[in-house]
Image (tube, helix red, strand yellow):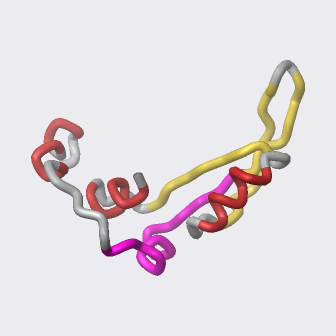
Amino acid sequence: MLHLAFAGLNAREAESDAFTDNHASNKVSQALGYVRNGTTWDTRRGEVAQIQRWVLTRDAWEQVRRDDIELTGVKECLPALGLG
């Protein structure tokens, strides 16, 4: 998905978030190169809980991007998405 966003759709950054006590999800974001981007609050099962926000910039993604992913058909879809 990140490869599609950055290489295919020319995204500038990607955002993610997870509840602060969801350690597995937060570790995945960190492993992918996301950096902490503040916190916010949401409701989970009727209770208020803190959310960790994450951001991944194009520059950071370029440092860890994979070279074994090939996108096909994206260029033809860009006009339908208002991107081409």
In the rendered view, would you say 76 is above or below 34? Answer: above
- Identity of the residue furthest to the right in this view: 47
Q: Please give left or right for residue 68 compared with residue 46 in the image.
A: left
Quadrant of residue 45 within the rendered picture: top right
- Identity of the residue furthest to the bottom in this view: 63
Image point (41%, 62%), residue name: 12
Q: Please give left or right for residue 63 compared with residue 81 in the image.
A: right
Q: Please give left or right for residue 28 compared with residue 82 in the image.
A: right
Q: Does the magenta stretch include residue 60?
A: yes
Residue nearer the viewer, 11 or 67:
67
In the rendered view, would you say 62 is above or below 52? Answer: below
Image point (29%, 54%), residue name: 9
Quadrant of residue 49 within the rendered picture: top right
Residue 41, image x and y in percent?
A: 80, 38
In the rendered view, would you say 17 is above or below 3? Answer: above
Image point (85%, 19%), residue name: 46
In the rendered view, would you say 74 is above or below 57? Answer: above
Residue nearer the viewer, 10 or 34:
34
Range drawn in magenta:
53-67
Q: Does the magenta stretch include residue 28?
A: no
What is the count of numbered marks? 0
Residue 33, image x and y in percent?
A: 58, 69
Quadrant of residue 34 within the rendered picture: bottom right
Residue 15, image x and y in percent?
A: 56, 52
Image point (41%, 73%), residue name: 65
- Identity of the residue furthest to the front in this view: 68
- Identity of the residue furthest to the left in this view: 76
